[in-house]
Image: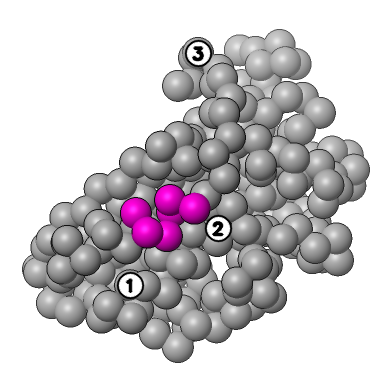
Amino acid sequence: GLTYYVQENDSYPKHMTLCMVVNVGSSDETISEKGYAHFVEHMAFQGTTNFPGTMALDYLGSKGAMLGSEINAFTQVSYTQYDFTALPSEKNVLDSVLMIMRDFASEITFDPKDVSNEKKVIVEELHMSDNVDRRLIDNYFSSLYDDDGFHIVNIIGSDDWLKYITSVELKKFYDKWYVPENIAVVLVGDIDTEYACNKIEELFSSMPHRTSPQKSAEYK
């Protein structure tokens, strides 16, 4: 099942930091799924069952946490990570942030309109990274790998691939990889650890229990 780590640390009184790590990255994509892991990461912030639209971000903003600062996410070759840092450690805030993480873990809605809108954001991200340094890195990795291997280190994908991504295919990829065995929750801060552990178990125990897919042996 799900793994979690909880540690009391009062070096920053009345605050806490949480992260959720999902054991899926670009190395787990097939060539036809290029960019899916990164796209799913983006869609977590576009709406879930219990936090439609920007409700999650609005709530976190009301607690002083802003996307791109205290709230962040990124996709790597072998994993995806969602960070929630320097938040007030009151129990009601802890409950809400854990519920947001729980929704990220199995309740992203993938509304087709949101997927279409987010494509533009990701294409812009791709173009912003299209510079000399990026091309040198791509050329270096393409010299090391064949086409099948190069797609592993190309996390965002390309314009050609992105335009064909659909909400249905993203949801299939999400349901396949976002399973309890693939997820770890980390919580550190000025907290009641017993309460926190009980809350994590309460919320995440209701996740659908699907079989964890086999990861690439090179990137486990």
Measuring from the top left, give residue 121's x and y in whole percent.
74, 62
Which residue is disc 1 drawn over?
94
- The amino acid at mark 1 is Leu
Q: Do the residues labelled 1 and 2 touch (CB within 8 Å)?
A: no
Q: Which residue is drawn at 62% across and 58% down?
A: 107
Location of the C terminus by quadrant is: top left
Residue 88 drawn above or below residue 105:
below
How far, Cα to Cα, is label 3 from label 1? Answer: 36 Å
Which residue is disc 2 drawn over?
104
The secondary structure that dominates the magenta segment is: helix
Which residue is disc 3 drawn over?
217
Looking at the image, tell me whether mark 3 or mark 1 is earlier in sequence order.
1
Location of the N terminus by quadrant is: top left
Looking at the image, tell me whether mark 2 or mark 3 is earlier in sequence order.
2
How far, Cα to Cα, is label 2 from label 3? Answer: 26 Å
Q: Which span is picked out in magenta? A: 201-206
Q: Do the residues labelled 2 and 3 touch (CB within 8 Å)?
A: no
